[in-house]
Image: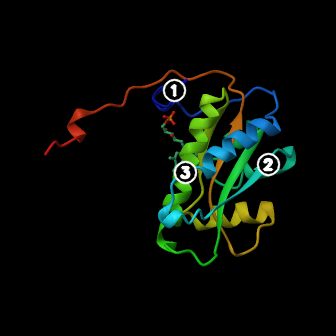
Amino acid sequence: MDAIEAIMTRRSVRHFTRQPVTDAELETVLRAAMAAPSAHNQRPWRFVAVRDRATLDRLATATMWATPVGRAQAAIVVYSERIALRAPGFWSIDCAAAIQNLLLAAHAGGLGAVWIGVYPITPFRRAVRKVLGLPATAAVHSMVALGHPERTPEPVDRWNPDWVRNV
Ligand SMILES: Cc1cc2nc3c(=O)[nH]c(=O)nc-3n(C[C@H](O)[C@H](O)[C@H](O)COP(=O)(O)O)c2cc1C
């Protein structure tokens, strides 16, 4: 699958089989995340790769829309350490770029995934931090539920030429 095909056919997957996510699969998607562009190349992202069932179940109730995490074989929690960044205002955009890379790598590798928003909702961020025992310095961004798809949603074409202005 080439890059354009991966981008155009990726859909959110919220139901997964019981087939585990391997170490190699996790490393591939994390490598893709870390390959993302970031402001000043500051790479503010940090990751928690979760496969422990009890922890997945607790994360599934940490936000209002995280139920897919409870059905997933793995989740990746994306956060940033509040370290001295060169462009601190860009940390959440940088993390979002990493997450999109991760979703595309998962899809291209035959996994299903869904982005679970956490930032900027403070109670959700606190809840995730608490489940993982992360320090107060950890700025939680998002979760990604991962696994082998129970079914693969059809691609959708969202092209809208009205949203493009040619000058
Ligand atoms: C910032 C962000 C937060 C999201 N949060 C959730 C979430 O909490 N739970 C969920 O099931 N899907 C979540 N999604 C997935 C969107 O619902 C999904 O991407 C959108 O409906 C488009 O569908 P598609 O991903 O299949 O193209 C989120 C997506 C983004 C980009």
Whole-angstrom CA distance, mark 3 to mark 1, is 17 Å
Q: Classify residue 134 by image quadrant.
A: bottom right
Residue annotated with mark 2: 50
Few, some or many residues within 10 Å of mark 1 (<14, 14–19, 20+): few
Amino acid type for the residue under numbered disc 3: Ala
Confirm if mark 2 falls within 8 A of ligand 1.
no
Residue 45 lies, with reference to residue 22, above or below; the image says below
Helix, strand, or loop for circle 1? loop
Location of residue 55 in the rendering, given as x and y in whole percent from the top left corner = 82, 51
Circle nearer the viewer, 1 or 2? 1
Q: Secondary structure at mark 2?
A: strand
In the figure, is residue 127 to the left or right of 156? right
* Res 98 seen here: yes
Marks 1,2: beta carbons within 8 A: no
Amino acid on which the number 1 mark rests in the picture: Asp
Mark before the other along the chain sequence, 3 or 1: 1
Q: Which residue is identified by label 3?
A: 36
Q: Residue at x 55, y 23 (%)?
A: 1
Disc 3 crowd rating (10 Å Cα; few below 14, some 14-19, many 20+) is some
**Location of residue 133 (image quadrant):** bottom right
Q: 111 or 142, which is in the foreground?
A: 111
Counting residues from the start of the chain, the first of labels 1 and 2 encountered is 1
Mark 2 or 3, nearer chain start: 3
| Image x and y of residue 147, in percent | 72, 33
Q: Which mark, by number, is residue 69?
A: none
Question: Mark 1 sits on what residue?
Answer: 2
Q: Residue at x 82, y 39 (%)?
A: 23
The residue drawn where x is 52% and y is 29% is: 6
